Amino acid sequence: MTVFQIQCFLSVAETLNFTEAANRLFIAQSSLSRNISHLEEEIGLTLFIRTKKYVRLTPSGTVLYSEFSKLLKLGQHALEKARNAELGETGSLCLGVLETQRSENFLPSRLGQLRKEHPNIQIDIISGTFRELREAVMDNRIDIALTLGFDMEDFNPDEVVFQPFFQSHPQCVISRSNPLATQPDFDLSALSSETMVAISPEISRGAYHNIVQFCERHGFQPAGAIYANSVQDLLLKVEAGLGFSVLDENCISDSNTSLLSVPIYKTDPLNLVAIWKRNNLNPAIPLFTNLLIPEDI
């Protein structure tokens, strides 16, 4: 059974005239009759009663006319939706942004371009912790998570796709109330007497390993460790003087006067990445991620 055979059947069913139906389809009447006959043979049903005076639908033909008409409309609607999606004329996109990230450095320009090129796509944005964003991506509550690249450690690489789009540099942060903050030449090795404030490995193994590796690279072990469940909680603990931490510069507000941020030189930059589920077929995802492709990464 082919789509063309169904179209031939519907045309005859609507006109009840083989000549008129053939003209409507721009084919020879013999070709129309042959397609109808092949369809009847294939499905094992007689669809029309034919006499020299008239053409009528059989009971089976009446049922198939009703159902095939619905299917054809559904198919046309599906094609229209697909074309609209390809053109970006309809759809929705939900983004999740890692909490405390200064999204003004990367998001408004991309979203502005998306809205300009595809004004009918509905956009929603939420913020969340490392774990909240991972769970939201895997549960299909958000389409794309914008988070730090080291959090890929907690994703199954076979289930997601990721794309770097923005770089920031790691900085050591400590409370300005800490005596170390008053030293003219802040030596990172002095942190060996301090407590490390880290994201709990239960929240993000990648974030935890990132600060542990920082300490190892600078040749010391901290005096102790306390854990936070979010970057915001981590910042509060550091501001309160409970210890030091390492964060990317893009999550540290310039207006936060309670923190001293010390650049960490000779260290690779941190990548912000877009992560989405491999089997998420939302056509708005490639429209947005194509706008994220950086020129220098």
Image: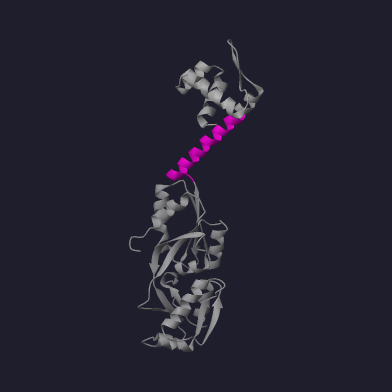
Q: Measured along the vertical axis of the image, is residue 152 above or below residue 263?
A: above
Prevailing secondary structure class for the magenta stretch in the rendered image: helix
Tell me if I can see residue 175 in this picture: no
Q: Does residue 45 appear left or right of residue 116 in this picture?
A: right
Q: Name the spot of residue 182 as percent of width and height, x first.
A: 41, 87
Picture layout, residue 7 above or below residue 142: above
* Viewer-side residue, 276 vs 56: 56
Image spot of residue 285 (x, y percent): 46, 53
Q: Residue furthest top?
A: 53
Name the quadrant of the C terminus. Answer: bottom left
Q: In which quarter of the image is the N terminus?
A: top right
In the rendered view, tell whether residue 94 sits above or below residue 29: below
- Which residue is rendered at x = 58% and y = 32% of the image? 70
Would residue 84 be counted in the magenta stretch? Answer: yes
Hey, which residue is sitting farthest left in the picture? 296
Does the magenta portion include 152?
A: no
For residue 210, say whether it is visible.
yes
> Residue at 62% of width from left, 27% of height from top?
44
Residue shown at 50%/79% (left/top)?
238
User: Is 261 displayed left or right of 4 in the figure?
Assistant: left
Q: Where is residue 121 in the image (x, y as percent from the top left)?
A: 47, 48
Residue at 47% across / 44% down in the picture? Answer: 85
Range of magenta residues: 66-90
